[in-house]
Amino acid sequence: MIVVSSRSMKVFFSQSRKDAKQYLNLIFKTLRLCAFASIISLSAFSQTVEVTKSTRIEKIEGKEYYIHKIIKGQTLYSLSKAYNVLISEIVFENPEAIDGIKPDMELRIPVAATTTSVSSPKDKPININGKYRVHTVEKGQTLYSISKQYNVSVEALKEANPLMPEALSLGQNLNIPVEQLIKPEETIYTSAKIENLKDTNVVDPRKINVVLLLPLYLDENKNSYRDSSGGSSNEAVYAKSLNGLEFYEGAMLAVDSLSKRGIKATVYAYDVPDDATLTNLLTTNVLKNADVIIGPFQGKRFETVANFARENKIVCVSPVLKKSDIAQDNPYVNKVLPSEEIQIREMGNYIGRWNCTKNIIVMFSGNTDSLLIEKLKEGIYSRCDKASIHFLNTKGRGVKLVDSLIQPGVENIVVAFSRDESYVSRLVLLLEKKNTKQRVVTLFGLDEWQDFENIEVEYFQNLNLHLPVDLFVDYSKPEVKNFLLKFRDKYLAEPDKYAYLGYDVTLYYLQMIQKFGNDFFKHPETIHANGLQSSFDFKKLGDGGLENQNTFILNYTDYRLVKVN
């Protein structure tokens, strides 16, 4: 159950793509199509090879497909252009392509391709209150073609346009029914109406009461659509709301999944765009009687909620903040993402476990990396207290200094703490040249390196790059594929990392409360689970709360990142 108010909202979830460069930048910057981001980022690094349409056509389950064999250098984008299909269509028919394409891979590409421009895909529009968007009839269009364009029935079009003449005319405006994201019995509390919500301050003791405090910015999005077919700038999504909307979508799928297994929850989803709204919210009985509060995303607002949670003895969950200090002195705080220090310690643990006798070189920049160095040493020495580690301060100096420390006849483990893509690019080029059978180099970097756009994946592959990350989706898992299908079916979009996060966090805490009651957080050793993107392995911080310790160590294998720990 989701409690609702009368306020309506329309949300635009993905913007139109003017050209390939804009399309790639949008994906990298907004993570709008997170499920495809790894594919496109990998493809973007290599030189694109011209695609020739395959002449091999096969009928599979009654549908005709081109069978295209990948040649090195071809990308999903170049394939989509050659066959005039959307990238999403290619990946939907070939789920294995989510982790990247490689030479000799055979892909199924639909013969009956969409006639929609690849750079401007037309998704079915979705808004919050389920009304209409307007379509202007173009030359040659019929009711049937328009119904296919928007994936609605001809009958639905007629019902939405009761005064429509028998024959369509050029320039005529039609109402296009829009699917609802939130049903009439569901709504998100809006900030503007908070003083009028006293009638909803009654909680259901028979259900788990969950409060979501999310950055939805309803007022800014009231004229926005989830529709990537284009439109005026005032219909574009307010960028700050994307993460909150994705999280909400994932959370709702989790609630739906658990309800089918007998776990009932009432979800109170609040828009928290500013401090004043939060202050008003903290006076309501809904928050005071919550079993768990998830959010807000913003640091200072979360601190305010954390203090409220401690006073009222309610578990509050930070799903996105990484700094450990938010849970340091508050036993009611649960922090889902491990801090960077924890990630580096776990990377050190991995290095010490598998490379105790190797030559380890740590490159850092002045005193700013001192804490990371200590955590790396802690991890390495926990596995191998006699490891040989060379520390190289590169502040103000070039990358060539590392050359003198690389030894022949042994594997050289190079750890670099730089977040500067230009610096890392120079380092990678140098190490790739030095990486021979006589002087083997294995490179370890930081989580942020996943987002570097201008370093060829082949270099990362050749240097056996390892990265410590907090979130990772294995698209080969059946449960992930099932989630993808459900998300696409309900929201007609691809989930990004916040959708997975919303699903994992909501599913995890509802199950924990169902199993252990409200004292579940007092026994962190019992709290371990694997989600679609997150794994939960909490540790108590002294007299404070719980912090997730799980870190994925990823390695480039066959031009894609795979989990190795």
Image (tube, helix red, strand yellow):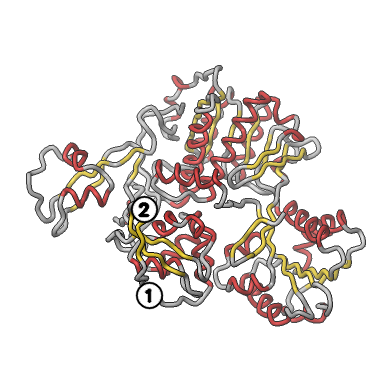
Residue named by callout 1: 52
Between residue 471 and residue 115, name the one nearer to us. Answer: 115
Amino acid residing under circle 2: Ala
Q: Residue at x 78, y 54 (%)?
A: 345
Between residue 329 and residue 509, name the one nearer to us. Answer: 509
Q: Residue at x 50, y 51 (%)?
A: 496
Residue 122 on image: x %, y %:
31, 54
Name the residue at the left extreme: 166
Category of crowding for the residue at label 2, using alpha-carbon neighbours closer than 10 angstroms: few (below 14), some (14–19), many (at least 20): many
Is residue 433 at least partly visible in the picture? yes
Amino acid residing under circle 1: Thr
Residue 202 circle label: none
Relative to 94, is 528 above or below?
Answer: above
- Label 2, secondary structure: give it: loop
Relative to 157, is 340 above or below?
Answer: below
Residue named by callout 2: 236
Q: Residue at x 37, y 45 (%)?
A: 11
Q: Which of the two discs, 1 and 2, sits closer to the camera?
A: 1
Relative to 84, is 410 above or below?
Answer: below
Tell me the CA gap for discs 1 and 2: 36 Å
Residue 113 on image: x %, y %:
31, 60
- Label 1, secondary structure: give it: loop
Category of crowding for the residue at label 1, using alpha-carbon neighbours closer than 10 angstroms: few (below 14), some (14–19), many (at least 20): few
Is 260 displayed left or right of 355 in the figure? left
- The picture quadrant where one finds residue 511 is top right
Which quadrant: the C terminus? Answer: bottom right
Is 503 displayed left or right of 3 in the figure? right
Residue 302 on image: x %, y %:
61, 40
Relative to 389, is 305 above or below?
Answer: above
